[in-house]
Amino acid sequence: MIAFSGGEPTLREDLFELVKFVADEYPLKSTALMTNGLKLADPNYVKKIKESSLIRVIFSFNGFSDKDYEETNNAKILDIKLKALKNLKEFKVSTSISSTILRGINEKEIKPIVEYVMDNLDFISELRFRGCAKVGRYDETHPLTHSEIFDLFAEAFGKDRDYFLKRFSRNDCYHSIQQFLVTFIIDNSKNKKEILGFIYDAYQKKTIGGKINTINVILKILFKKGIKKFFQAVIESKILNFSENYKIRYNKVNLLFDKLNIKRLDIKVWWWTDKTNLDLDEMKAVGIMHVTHNGKILLMPDAVIIADEL
């Protein structure tokens, strides 16, 4: 993926030309725009973005309270944000909702955000939750730990955290100390969305647990949709050509799911650690470390010092 970020990339007057250039010159790459979304309140702007061949908008959205936006953005911008989302939906632009969760400010917004996403799977394909880094206006903030954010995320989906973790050791599913990735497979054929299962990111799909989980999801889809309808969708989506590149196969999986009225929602939960929000249990569970040639571990020096002292 080639992402246009900033600052705020929509301040560039040549943004449409840049996106079109990347789409033309690198057709096997997907493109994404990381934005506060304020300019997207203009439907003509979203139309131009769509016509430039942009694949995805990563949209900063921290909840449904203007009071919270005054705290985080020094402005009442909820109405503008909602207009932008309406335009993205109207023009069918694949959208990622990116939410920064701040202690004492918008933890309560996680559940409404989840509900909004689940009601708008026709254009929202990803949901990101993250803590804040102790920089800029947040240098005095005490950030939420990864575990705290993850607990809030699981509660918003009405699930115990073990629902996601029980088949995997934390070594398996936390592929780095800062990030948890999972894809929900959702039956979108009823008013009440049903989570059929979940598949961990590409790093974990290759594990035994990951393969078992993937098979379980496929069996649930078969049971829900019927063997005939399932295999008809497989044939029509032409998904069985395994020699194609990732981008083509990704689009074919989406086509297969559309034919079955199945949606997938990528979930990312992460935070930036420092000595004020270190979770020792989290650190001990991580399976990846950086080691020098003489065996010295290089895994967040502050964290290592604290662990040694304890």
Image: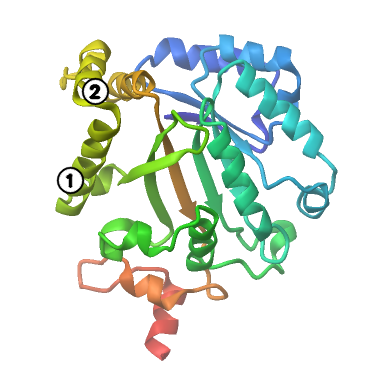
Task: Sort mark 2 into few (<14), some (14-19) or many (20+) by Cα contacts within 10 Å.
Answer: some
7 left or right, relative to 80: left
* Residue labelled with disc 2: 230
Q: Residue at x 38, y 14 (%)?
A: 27
Residue type at tag 2: Phe
Q: Does residue 287 appear anywhere in the picture?
A: no
Give yes or no for contact between labels 1 and 2 (Cβ–Cβ under 8 Å): no
- In this rendering, does residue 213 appear at all? yes
Residue at image location 50% in from the left, 52% down from the top: 157
Asked if residue 206 is positioned above or below residue 164 in the image, the reply reads above
Question: Sequence-wise, which precedes: disc 1 or disc 2?
Answer: 1
- Asked where in the image residue 98 lies, by quadrant, the reply is top right
Residue 132 picture location, percent across and down: 61, 58
What's the amino acid at mark 1? Lys
Number of numbered discs: 2
Dot 1, crowdedness within 10 Å: few (<14), some or many (≥20)? some
Which disc is residue 20 wearing?
Answer: none
Quadrant for residue 196, please give it: top left
Label 1, label 2: how many angstroms apart (C-alpha)?
20 Å
Residue at 42% over, 90% down? 309
SS state under label 2: helix
